[in-house]
Amino acid sequence: MVQTDCIFCRIIAGKLPAMMVHQDDLCVAFRDINPQAPVHLLVVPREHFASLDEATPERRELLGHLLLTAARVANAEGLTEKGGGYRTVINTGAGVGQSVFHLHVHVLGGRPMGWPPG
Ligand code: AMP
């Protein structure tokens, strides 16, 4: 269900602008407003749920679709394994940096990255 107080629901509903790079029946992808790398995209399910902790077995297909879409939008930006690769991140919980409580997959690339993440 659409949550009127959710920033990503408002983007999906077209009530807030975003730089969309992908849209389909199940999800959208747009550029992060505060990019942490030359390419920083967010893949967001149309269905509102807060985090990976709400990823029930009924959402198995959707969750797989989000990862396939992450690879597709990364590749479309030139981020392939040979092209420097990319990192996908799902923050779950405020303690590890989640700030928007509508599940999303970060897709970051275009610069070298260290490990472990901070
Ligand atoms: P997280 O901290 O993992 O919950 O990630 C939320 C991300 O959403 C952050 O990287 C923000 O920069 C990004 N963000 C917040 N508001 C917007 C917006 N209106 N358009 C695009 N990205 C946003």
Image: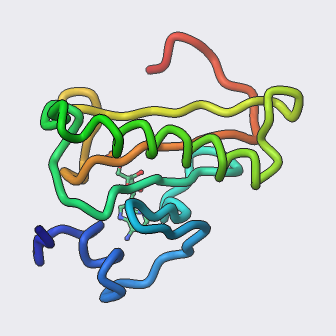
Name the spot of residue 45 as percent of width and height, x first: 34, 56
**Looking at the image, what colour scheme do you see?**
rainbow
Quadrant of the frame with the N terminus: bottom left
In the image, residue 7 above or below residue 97: below
Name the spot of residue 111 as percent of width and height, x first: 75, 35
In the image, residue 101 above or below residue 57: below
| Residue at 75% across, 30% down | 85
Residue situated furthest bottom in the rendering: 15
| Residue at 50% across, 59% down | 32
Quarter for ligand 1? bottom left
Residue situated furthest top in the rendering: 116
Is 11 placed left or right of 72 in the picture?
left
Specify whether residue 94 is in view: no
Is 60 placed left or right of 72 in the picture?
left
Specify whether residue 111 is in view: yes
**How many labels were placed on the picture?**
0
Quadrant of the frame with the C terminus: top left
| Residue at 80% across, 35% down | 80
Name the spot of residue 24 as percent of width and height, x first: 48, 67
In the image, residue 25 above or below residue 67: below
- Taking depth in this image into account, of 79 and 66 the one nearest to the observer is 66
- Taking depth in this image into account, of 26 and 33 the one nearest to the observer is 26
| Residue at 56% across, 75% down | 19
Is 84 placed left or right of 96 in the picture?
right
